[in-house]
Image: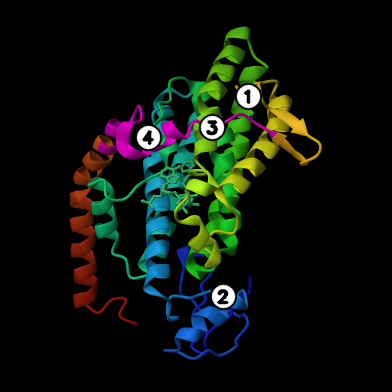
């Protein structure tokens, strides 16, 4: 994937949440207003930038996926935040707070990336709150014990990395660049979860049992994060043709299983699937059938915590109204006095 820039320059750096600053890259000029230019950019494996002409369906697909991704990040703060006040030590508490804060940051980069496509952030949040836009199924499961924080870090963030590393090569520049930083942070999160489970599994028998129970509950829902099977995934073919998705749902699910089985062995924990076995011929682990009926039920709103997550999110949004009003009033004052006009 190359960064091909219009003569005006459109590339941004992922750092500093900056999606629009020109930077050095392939400065090949491209014509504006030419519908063939989009196809050519994709064919040349170049990035599409906000000011490029793009088909409306491409733009809509990206807004759908990026918004769902952003919503997942901010709803994803809830299950782990549940344990901040009960973390077993000050060190664990500080690490968990930083992690949950990172997730808020990921949400912000992603909403900013959606804005480069003309989406309105307030409107996206409205769509989340009214149930018109989705968020990841995984965050509708409860965090019953401290070990669940470890299981989320290891399995959920582990699955997120497998899903999101290819998105660093997504054809849409601002989304791809946001993913670079998100993936770096997710790697810390994954190690943090692994370390929590490692400590528990090498602790007392009760601690090890707690770790095993968390892995038992989070394993299958983590496999569901990758979405429905390929032959039941309405968006995959087009998203892959557009270079938004680089691998299919099933391919990434398999990659996650292959990565995780040896890690479970290193942890001294078992995965709750007796069908996991190395297949020499395929060069992959075989694994049991995922219950996709459960995934579809959770997506429909019938998971164990859907109602609670949405109620909490709406309440947090209402409670934050005064902050948004104050920020708008401040911005208006700044604009009036000409500060920042340059
Ligand atoms: N949960 O045609 P498909 C994180 C929906 S954040 C809910 O395969 P697509 C983290 C899908 O949207 C994790 N819905 O769709 C955060 C579609 O519905 P619509 C979030 C799901 O888009 C905090 C329908 O099912 N990651 O890890 O081609 C703390 C058909 O599916 C799910 C992302 O969002 C699901 N699991 O592929 C810790 C990554 N799966 O929209 C960790 C970016 C499917 O047509 N997103 N659906 O009504 C993607 O990579 C893709 O959107 C997906 C789905 C692979 C998720």
Relative vertical location of residue 219 with respect to residue 166 in this rendering, above or below: above
Residue positioned 47% across, 50% down in the render: 233
How packed mark 3 is, by other alpha carbons closer than 10 Å (few <14, some 14-19, many 20 or more), is some
Query: In this image, 325 relative to 124: left or right?
Result: left
Reading the chain from its start, which is encountered first: label 3 or label 1?
Answer: 1
Reading the chain from its start, which is encountered first: label 1 or label 4?
Answer: 1
Looking at the image, which is closer to me, 313 or 128?
A: 128
Q: Is residue 89 visible?
A: no
Residue 106 at what x, y percent from top left?
45, 52
- Position of the N terminus by quadrant: bottom right
Find the magenta span and give its range. 286-310
Disc 1 target residue: 271
Dot in front, 2 or 3? 3
Residue 276 at what x, y percent from top left?
68, 27
Looking at the image, which is closer to me, 229 or 178?
A: 229
Q: CA distance from mark 3 to mark 1?
A: 13 Å
Disc 3 target residue: 290
């Amino acid at each position: 994937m190359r960064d091909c820039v219009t003569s005006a320059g459109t590339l941004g750096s992922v750092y500093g949440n900056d999606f629009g600053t020109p930077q050095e890259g392939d400065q090949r000029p491209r014509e504006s207003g030419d519908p063939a230019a989009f196809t050519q950019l994709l064919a040349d494996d170049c990035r599409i930038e906000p000011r490029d002409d793009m088909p409306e369906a491409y733009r809509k697909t990206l807004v759908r996926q990026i918004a769902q991704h952003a919503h997942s990040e901010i709803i994803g703060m809830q299950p782990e935040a549940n344990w901040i006040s009960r973390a077993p030590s000050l060190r664990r508490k500080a690490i968990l707070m930083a992690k949950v804060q990172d997730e808020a940051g990921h949400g912000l980069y992603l909403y900013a990336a959606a804005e480069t496509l003309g989406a309105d952030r307030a409107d996206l949040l409205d769509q989340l709150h009214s149930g018109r836009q989705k968020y990841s199924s995984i965050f509708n499961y409860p965090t019953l014990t401290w070990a669940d924080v470890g299981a989320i870090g290891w399995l959920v963030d582990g699955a997120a990395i497998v899903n999101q590393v290819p998105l660093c090569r997504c054809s849409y520049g601002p989304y791809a660049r946001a993913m670079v930083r998100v993936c770096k942070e997710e790697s810390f999160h994954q190690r943090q979860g692994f370390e929590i489970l490692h400590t528990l599994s090498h602790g007392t028998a009760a601690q090890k049992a707690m770790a095993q129970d968390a892995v038992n509950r989070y394993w299958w829902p983590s496999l569901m994060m990758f979405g429905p099977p390929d032959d039941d995934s309405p968006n995959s073919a087009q998203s892959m043709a557009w270079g938004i998705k680089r691998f299919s749902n099933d391919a990434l699910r398999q990659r996650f299983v292959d990565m995780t089985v040896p890690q479970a062995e290193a942890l001294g924990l078992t995965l709750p699937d007796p069908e996991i076995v190395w297949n020499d011929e395929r060069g992959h682990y075989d694994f049991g059938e995922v219950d996709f009926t459960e995934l579809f039920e959770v997506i429909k709103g019938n998971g164990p915590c859907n109602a609670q997550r949405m109620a909490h999110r709406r309440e947090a949004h209402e409670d934050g109204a005064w902050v948004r009003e104050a920020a708008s009033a401040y911005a208006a004052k700044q604009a009036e006095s000409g500060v920042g006009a340059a």
